Image: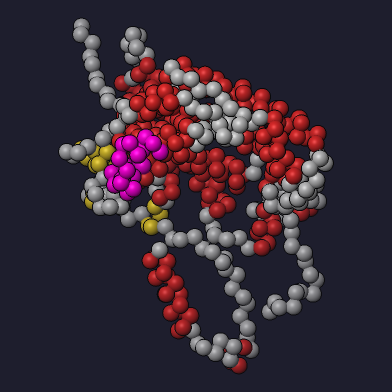
């Protein structure tokens, strides 16, 4: 069985991701279908019968997977916009990316206006 | 493709309508500064053309509505998914798009579209064959042997010996926001030193750590798979991989055959992301979490990162993408293969 941690932690993480998702649209995240569904699912499976606990783990696993999906997408988009989303870089930017700087020529290079 | 052609033609027309004598006397006197535009501009994303996203339950399953218009697949089929949770997740994907629709973040929608349209027209057998194709060269079999990984690590680390000298500090702070500390693992400045015995101390020590890491991390997973499915696998240090017994293959094929088409599409997707059938099975049987499976899949890369450092725009970027895809595939498999039934206690 995979180590998942506490369900409360997963739940809080999911709420955080939902807040991030709905921060841009400006609507409160509590009005979304995802929030309602998650609340319902978490409440309904809060107590399972002790005979077979697999279902609880299964739902917790799905919740953790969904949390991983939302978080990874958010971080991926942030990295994409930072590094890859603006097209090709100029020579100065490419040099700056690895900590280098283009040489300065005091009199100009000759072709500037 | 045609869209880009149209754009090119438009651009061409724009060029043609420009005055031919661009450098005529009147304009040549006041030369314009060269426009500092980027050579490649990423293609424009589609605008978000809807306000509200809702879910309705139809005959074939759950449907997504974008402002009273039904969502359709690329082949114009009605978008219907079998489970409510999947519909909620897909609707959330559409709902959280801000100004433009970023299709590369919508992995669950992509998986549903593939399952509904089946653009490559594959049947169940072909899907299972595509998934079990990875069994021969599964990532977790190929433990680096001392000789093999010695030669590989030599290629990575000592054959292409990277500079380990950092530039002066004022270069680091002088750059713009994009400036990042120069990094040896970036692979951007590589000086090839083809002296094979030059860094021999390296080759002896480093593979041993890697082999130990791989044995410690991968062997429990292989052991779990052998116990879970009652098969014999074993690992190999040869580049050809172990010879998988025919019975192992039969058992795994018959196990995969118990999934439906939707789940199989997801399984094949995850297998092709992780390059490993065993890790995928561990993920689907709730033995590994997504983070663990992804880490095990790119163990050697993690080892190199530990040694050389992580580069944000390459390593982290790929890690997040791989995690997102794997999580989407695993969730898709779970949501498509489950059949939930509510049974109340008799009091």
Visible in this render: residue B213?
yes
Tally the numbered discs.
0
Q: Report the residue at 50% width, 39% height from top.
A: B322
From this view, report whether residue B259 is shown above or below residue A78.
above
The image quadrant where one finds the C terminus of chain B is top left
Depth order, front residue of A74/B297: B297
Rendered position, B340 above or below B181: above
Is residue B1 or residue B230 the one in the foreground?
Answer: B230
Expressed as whole percent of the image width and height from the top left, the position of residue B4 reads 42, 66
Taking the magenta stretch, the answer to whether it contains residue B25 is no
Residue A39 found in image quarter: top left
Give how far across and how far down residue A86 sits, in percent. 54, 58
Please tell me which residue is depicted at 71% across the width and 27% down the height of the picture. Answer: B208
Residue stretch in magenta: B111-130
Q: Position of residue B304 (x, y in %)?
A: 67, 37
Q: Main secondary structure of the magenta part?
A: helix
- In the rendered view, how is the structure colored? secondary structure
Q: Residue at x 35, y 9 (%)?
A: A50
Looking at the image, residue B174 sits to the left or right of residue B213; the answer is: right
- Of residue A104 and residue B14, the one placed in the foreground of this image is B14
Point out the residue furthest to the right here: B198
Q: Which of B189 and B211 lies nearest the eye of the viewer?
A: B211
| Looking at the image, residue B147 lies above or below residue B65 | above
Q: Residue pushed farthest top?
A: B347
Q: Is residue B228 visible?
A: no
**In this view, which residue lies farthest toward the left?**
B59
The quadrant of the image that shows the N terminus of chain B is bottom left
- Picture coordinates of residue B164 (x, y %)? 78, 45
Identify the residue at image location x=55%, y=90%.
B21
Q: Is B127 inside the magenta-drawn segment?
A: yes
């Amino acid at each position: 069985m995979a180590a998942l941690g506490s369900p409360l932690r997963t739940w809080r993480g999911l709420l955080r991701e939902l807040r991030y998702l709905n921060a841009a649209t400006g609507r409160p995240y509590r009005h979304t279908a995802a929030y309602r569904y998650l609340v319902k699912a978490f409440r309904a499976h809060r107590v399972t019968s002790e005979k077979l606990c697999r279902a609880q783990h299964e739902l917790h696993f799905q919740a953790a997977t969904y949390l991983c999906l939302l978080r990874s997408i958010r971080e991926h988009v942030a990295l994409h916009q930072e590094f890859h989303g603006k097209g090709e870089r100029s020579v100065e930017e490419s040099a700056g990316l690895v900590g280098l700087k283009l040489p300065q020529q005091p009199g100009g290079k000759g072709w500037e206006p | 493709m045609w869209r880009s052609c149209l754009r090119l033609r438009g651009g061409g027309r724009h060029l043609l309508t420009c005055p031919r004598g661009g450098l005529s006397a009147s304009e040549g006197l006041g030369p314009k500064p060269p426009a500092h535009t980027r050579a490649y501009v990423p293609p424009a994303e589609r605008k978000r053309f809807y306000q509200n996203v809702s879910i309705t339950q139809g005959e074939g399953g759950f449907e997504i509505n974008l402002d009273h218009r039904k969502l359709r697949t690329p082949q114009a089929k009605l978008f219907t998914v079998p489970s409510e949770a999947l519909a909620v997740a897909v609707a959330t994907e559409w709902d959280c798009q801000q100004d433009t629709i970023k299709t590369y973040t919508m992995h669950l929608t992509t998986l549903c579209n593939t399952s509904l349209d089946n653009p490559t027209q594959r049947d169940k057998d072909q899907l299972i064959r595509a998934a079990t194709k990875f069994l021969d060269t599964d990532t977790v079999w190929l433990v680096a042997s001392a000789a093999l990984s010695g030669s590989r690590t030599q290629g990575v680390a000592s054959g292409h010996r990277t500079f380990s000298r950092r530039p002066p500090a004022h270069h680091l702070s002088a750059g713009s926001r994009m400036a990042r500390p120069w990094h040896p693992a970036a692979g951007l400045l590589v000086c090839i030193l083809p002296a094979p015995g030059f860094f021999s101390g390296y080759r002896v020590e480093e593979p041993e750590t890697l082999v130990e890491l791989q044995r410690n991390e991968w062997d429990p997973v292989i052991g779990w798979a052998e116990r879970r499915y009652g098969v014999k696998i074993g690992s190999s240090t040869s580049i050809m991989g172990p010879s998988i017994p025919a019975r192992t293959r039969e058992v795994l094929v018959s196990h995969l055959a118990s999934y439906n088409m939707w789940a199989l599409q997801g399984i094949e997707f995850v297998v092709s992301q992780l390059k490993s059938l065993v890790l995928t099975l561990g993920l689907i049987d709730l033995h590994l979490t997504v983070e663990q499976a992804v880490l095990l899949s790119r163990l050697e890369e993690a080892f190199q990162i530990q040694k050389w450092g992580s580069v944000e725009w390459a390593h982290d970027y790929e890690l997040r993408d791989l995690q997102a895809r794997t999580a989407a595939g695993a969730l898709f498999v779970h949501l498509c293969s489950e059949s939930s039934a509510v049974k109340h206690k008799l009091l």
